[in-house]
Image (tube, rainbow, N blue to C red):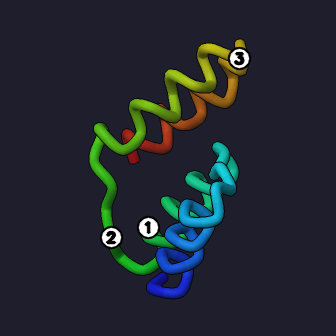
Amino acid sequence: MEEAARMLLEMHRSNCEADGVTYTTLISGFCKCGHNPCATTYLPITLAYEKIEELEECLELIEEMKD
């Protein structure tokens, strides 16, 4: 996960904008390593899904948070 965090920093330094896939992948990786994200972590993602009218994905994420 340290390498992933370094890559995100390098992307930022290179003016390469991270997208939802990037952030979702990072969150998933941190979860697999035992880090438990809080609801605050998921809120921007759910709002992004809602904004692009991907409500099914939004609801799936909320259900995942409950587990």
In the depicted view, which residue is nearer to us: 5 or 34? 5
Residue ID for mark 2: 35
Look at the numbered disc 2 and give the secondary structure of its residue: loop
Residue 49 spot, x, y in % from top left = 62, 25
Q: How many angstroms separate mark 1 from mark 3 (CA)?
A: 25 Å
Relative depth, front residue between 43 and 67:
43
Mark 2 against mark 3, which lies toward the viewer? 3
Q: Could you tell me the amino acid type at mark 1?
A: Cys
Circle 1: element type: helix
- The numbered mark, 2 or 3, whose residue comes first in the sequence reads 2
Contact? badges 1 and 2 (CB < 8 Å): yes
Q: Residue furthest bottom?
A: 3
Q: Mark 1 points at which residue?
A: 31
Q: Distance between the residues labelled 1 and 2?
A: 5 Å
Q: Residue at x 71, y 13 (%)?
A: 53
Which type of secondary structure does the marked residue at label 3 adopt? loop
